[in-house]
Image (cartoon, rainbow, N blue to C red):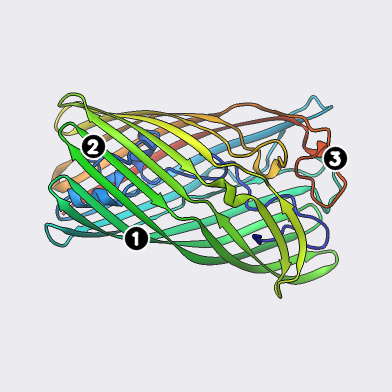
Amino acid sequence: MRRLYPLLGFASLGIMISVNAHASGFRLPEASIAGVGTSNALVANYKELGAVAYNPAAMSFHEGTNIVAGLVLIDHKASVTPAGKTDKIDSDHNSPAYIPNLSVINRRSPQWSWGININAPFGLETNWPKNTFPLPASMHPAETRIELVNFNPNVSYKINANTSAAVGLDYYRVREVKLNTQAGTIKGDGGDFGWNAALMHVAGPWSFGASYRSAISVGVNGNLTSPLGSAGVAADVNLPWMLQIGARYQATDKLGVEFDYERTGWKKFNQIIVATSTGSPLVINSNGWSNADAYRLGMTYDLNANNQLRAGYSRDLTGQGDAHFSARVSDADRNLFSVGIRHKIAGGWELEGAYMYVKFDDRNYASTTLVSSPDPNGTAAYNGKYENSAHLFGLGVTKRF
């Protein structure tokens, strides 16, 4: 069984780490500005420095020392029209959010390279106003928020002129988790380690890449505050494994096309056990998520020696079924459309810009299960039409030494 940070130990738990992010569940795959511009289809791209955050084995194909830095602004809108009502209610969360990313890469020898990627692979928030859903205050979701940073050092080895492999650590630092109801608040933090491995192979105009990141359970400690008082609480935040594989074809001297497949292990998000800081269970909650797929198409086109255009499309599928649906993560299948540009300037500097539009499928949720326990997941309390969309704007800079 898996324990997760409790929402309100004295009465309820809606779900854990909620967010309406921009890949399935609460995943944020936008690890670089080049990734935003190509809808995250970069795992097989050995040419672009922004691909290293997706596939660390790409480090072996870049000489010298390189720094890639970017900032992504995410303007996310979430709303629900509850069953039996005609007015749409917006989630009152802080938008826009600002997500930074940084990669530092260094080739130590013809065979060995090292680097570190810093980004936020999961996150964002929802905040439903009072009386949005027909639930008592102790069960009614309020603000749900996660701020998480991943520190990902890697080493890569160039096996031969066309093939490289990489391994690394993922340190997930949960800077803040808030899991509130209308009757109480709870927040905490924590951190733990996972691992990753990657491959890259170039064969003429083709290149192939694969990247795997392990599942990880982050131990979180914090405090519960409610009308009944305050208490220490502890839990495990279970984050999924991620597998990406891709193929890229250099169709002409100017045009490159890539197709990626991603699978996210959301079954790790199957069960939540709410416990006191001493380990005594308070609430057991089921989510019943399934592993989810994403399909990504990205293109780069070199206008000239200094300017490159980028575009992409992704279809991301949700792992959240109806059996344990929660408004805290009102997830749905979605389409991602993106464009981007890179401009080289003097002194080894490059400027990057990107825009992405994320359109979630409308989700009409209708359950016949009545609320009969402190857990409202999968019940008629959340019936309604859920709508989500997001605009992402990215700016970045690259320096080659």
Which residue is at the front of the view, 380 or 71? 380
Where 333 falls versus 133 (above or below)? above
Q: Earlier in the sequence, mark 3 or mark 2?
A: 3
Q: Which residue is mark 2?
A: 207
Residue type at mark 3: give it: Pro
Q: Number of labelled discs? A: 3
Indicate the secondary structure of the residue bearing disc 2: strand
Image-based side of 203 in relation to 276, left or right: left
Q: Quadrant of residue 196?
A: bottom left
Residue name at image x 30 percent, y 44 percent: 51
Task: Work out how far the residue at label 2 is from the one at label 1, CA to CA, in angstroms.
Answer: 22 Å
Indicate the secondary structure of the residue bearing disc 1: strand
Label 3 crowding class (10 Å Cα cut-off): few <14, some 14-19, many 20+? some
- Asked if one can make out residue 4 in the rendered structure from this viewpoint, the answer is no
- Asked if one can make out residue 226 in the rendered structure from this viewpoint, the answer is yes
Q: Earlier in the sequence, mark 2 or mark 1?
A: 1
Q: Earlier in the sequence, mark 3 or mark 1?
A: 3
* Residue 168: mark: 1
Q: Nearer the viewer, mark 3 or mark 2?
A: 2
Label 2 crowding class (10 Å Cα cut-off): few <14, some 14-19, many 20+? many
Which residue is at the front of the view, 241 or 376? 241
* Residue 398: mark: none
* Residue 134: mark: 3
Residue type at mark 2: give it: Ser
